[in-house]
Image: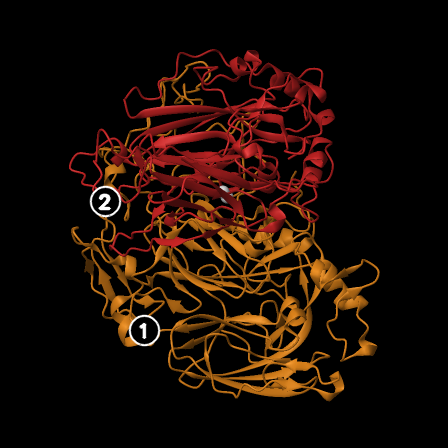
Chain colours: A red, B orange
Amino acid sequence: MKIDVKAIPLALALGLMACVVPALAFVQYGSGTMDTRNHNGATDGFIKMPDGRDVYTFGFTNISGLIHYNNLSTAVRSGRAKNHAEFPAPTLDFKEGHNEYLSLSTLGMAMRPDLFDPHTIHFHGYPNATPVFDGEPMASISVNQGADFTYFYRLNDPGTYIYHCHREAPEHMEMGMLGNLVVRPLQDDNRVGLVCADGRAAAGAGSYAGFAYNDGDCSTGYDKDILIQFADIDPAFHDADSFAQKLPFADFVARYSVLNGRGYPDTVDTAPITNNASAFSGLLGNYDAQRIHALMTINRPGGERVLIIRLSNLSIQNFATIEIPGLPVQVIGKDAKFLRRPNGKDLRYYTSSVLIGPGESAELRIDTTGVAAGTYYLYSRNLDELHADQMDRSGAMTEIRIN
Amino acid sequence: MMTIRNTLGAVMALVGLSCFPVADGYAMIDGHTGAGTTPVFNLTAKQGRVATGDGNSLIFWGFADDDGQDSSQSLKGQVQYPGPTLIVTEGATVTVNLANTLPEPVSLVFPGLDVLTSVVPVFRNGMKGRLSSIVPEAAPSGKQTYTFTATRPGTFYYQSGSNQAVQIRMGLFGAIIVRPKVQTAKTYTNVFPNHQTTDKTFTKFAYNEAGVPDQVTPPGGTAISNIGASTGYDREFLYLMSEMDPDFQVWMELGRNTAKSPASFGDWIDPVIKRDFTQWKANYWFANGRNAPDDMGGAFDKNLPNQPYNCLPLMHPGEMILTRFVNMGRDLHPLHTHGNHQRIVAEDGLIASSAANPLDQSLTTITGADLSTEEFTLTMAPGNSFDSLFTWTGKGLGWDAYGHKPGDPPAPYEYLADHVGGPASSIIAPGPQDTLTSKYANGQFQPPLPDGTPAPAQAVPTVFSADPLTLTFDQWFSGSPYLGSTEPLPPSNVSLNYGGSSYYFMWHSHAEREITNNDVFPGGMLTMMGIVPASIALPAE
Ligand SMILES: [Cu+2]
Ligand SMILES: [Cu+2]
């Protein structure tokens, strides 16, 4: 919703600017050991594509470390959050059994001060949800500029999820308000009585680092796991939003396809990508906007053997067929559900490619036993997702390095 | 950026929603039920116009039901998008008489059904020997009869078998529902462990499951409810997905050289906008033939004369709802169900069964849908149908979503650990309340009671401040975090909430571009699924 600034009464405008909320005591988000919290700010920023192009974004930034209570004015004063949107959003890494208090503060848009859009957080796939904490605005509430809200999730169901802003979702998601979300199973921490069917130790030396699900037999165990999210970008759309133009949904063309916000070869660069925000406003400084790489390594001499890829897709248009040639890929979960059904039916399967649609997730398990050392590739087989605009040998591709 | 559409039709549709709805289309699948073992349907292919969610009007080709449908509001002979939903019973021998008023030959194919009409392609001399239809056709002003046996239950469709690249894009399709012959009541026990009500008795089923055992024991595990193999349901809904490229529809209306007919029929080469089939790109997306927000209006709305069907599921907590998905479009559509996973029990009219021969009803009647899977996003390829089951109880939230005060009894399908006083009922703590601002330390609101004392602590604050500076409330929200409660909404807010105290969850294409209407958000394949408190009656099925 765009608000005509000139039409806002003076008193209201002053109220908006003041945003005075008396500093409250430290938040008691429950003091139990099962209580966890995170705090996201919603704002704008810039990212850099593999061909050097700067793209204006909306997004989230983790402000948990900046403020310890839910008070917007502190976040703003910190000066380190506004216009520091990251792409993808900071990963939310949760554990089954925990009670998560996830706060959202809307920090304003440096490049679009006219844009009074509220924001939300949608925990996509949370089972038995309620509208109030679903972040889907039409059926609940969204958080206006300058306001805060805390979502509460009791985490019962392990798996790979995703999260995104749902306010005017086609726009805000295309603009970059999306991220990875995982709920790790109780079995990670409680291995009493667990016996691994493959003969590995269930706990202690030589055991799996973690599991995708409470499988009871280590069949979803991994030595390493990684969250990889597919998305794509139409720079014309971002430019239009930056200059407050009509948004081209009808003429949408994804020119950049990304994994964790990067096109190849940036996907395998483990360092953050620093943006070029200062070029667009003298008030802005450059910062690390793309912090999450997509490089996978399995160090077998160091005892690693099994990799789990937690794959998701948050494109607003495109499907991706993810291919991983040369490695045995077992699909063990889809949409945060273990593919061994409660009735015992085993629906896991081996494949060399996985079709993943917008809003879907899947867990891929790769056991590298007997695999030749070397570099393997994970990429979208959709050929128009393997370039960065004019630049070939790019797009949705990354590497799995096995030694 | 949100643009509210401005046509009278949409306003009427939305206003209609805020009143208590008529029974038609709110809790059922509208269509034409063919009685007996030899039902006959009389369809006529005609041209009509669809109204889009942003106020545009496009021509389409569709089918009219010459006999009218189950609803008393249906009009005989009115062409509609999509075509009439044909509902028959397993074992029926179905006859469809097709009359054609369109300028080119039309025919009917019934994928997945046992068609008795001989499948003979038609090549026409007038079309220089080109393929006219893949099955016997009704020539312009002509007629043709088709028969098929509804051998197995399931969700199917009919569509044109002539010039499909044009005619299916134009809308010549409709759903077919085959209900199982046996609909004997069956009770599953312990479907909802530790809920106020644990069992489910079904009288309606998507597939035959008379022999499905009540319990199942996974290898090395303990016995659990076998609900995961059941296809029983309380209410059913149809989601027929389709899409249009407005440039193509406009060309069909204005740009096509009919003088060259019929040889060039459908050769979409538009010299003005330089478009052809390879550049076809959908910019309107439909659920049951309407774009959002019109799909959430009433069925048989007189303002949408050629789009009689709506798409607005409603359910009570603990009910099992069957959604029959049919993708009649050209693109894949990922349908995301907010609120919970859905369990996919069949694809393309074939039950997800481990039976040695899944076509054999005597086998699948015992296995049921034992290979069903749960998904939060269902990808539908073109031509796919899926049968899915969805339920919701609010289990495991860590707070009492029904808003109970101490001493209140649990709601009919409430999860007892979350019920007020239960072991998990108050995990979420609102934190200390600031007496000055009424604001809780977690940023949420609960005004003090009239005497100034803080309101009694509930799991989630009872009242969110309708402070427009802080939070935006939208039209499907009750104003309360609790199911069954209503709280004041901002004065400007027109509530679309059923009974004012229901929960709503968006069910929508997660290819989010598809929830716009030609650049206008919101629109497209977007519907709101309502969970209505048990205390508020829903229309009987
Ligand atoms: Cu989503
Ligand atoms: Cu959504």
Q: In which quarter of the image is residue A192?
A: top left
Q: Does mark 1 fall on the same chain as mark 2?
A: no
Q: In the rendering, which numbered label is found on residue A198?
A: 2
Front residue of this view, candidates A285 and A379: A379
Structural crowding at the residue carrying mark 2, measured as other residues with C-alpha within 10 Å and reported as few (<14), some (14–19) or many (≥20)? few
Location of residue B333 with respect to B203 vertically, above or below? above
Front residue of this view, candidates A70 and A379: A379
Kindly identify which chain the residue marked by label 1 belongs to.
Answer: B
Residue at 61% x, 35% y: name it: A175
Residue B535 image point, x, y percent: 35, 49
Residue at 20% x, 57% y: name it: B189
Structural crowding at the residue carrying mark 1, measured as other residues with C-alpha within 10 Å and reported as few (<14), some (14–19) or many (≥20)? few
Residue B446 image point, x, y percent: 41, 25
Q: In the rendering, which numbered label is found on residue B357?
A: 1
Location of residue B90 with respect to A235 vertically, above or below? below
Residue B437 image point, x, y percent: 46, 16
- Element type where label 2 sits in the image: loop
Kindly identify which chain the residue marked by label 2 belongs to.
Answer: A
Q: Quadrant of residue B482?
A: top left
Location of residue A330 with respect to B308 vertically, above or below? above
Give the amino acid type for the residue marked by disc 1 in the picture: Asn
- Element type where label 1 sits in the image: loop
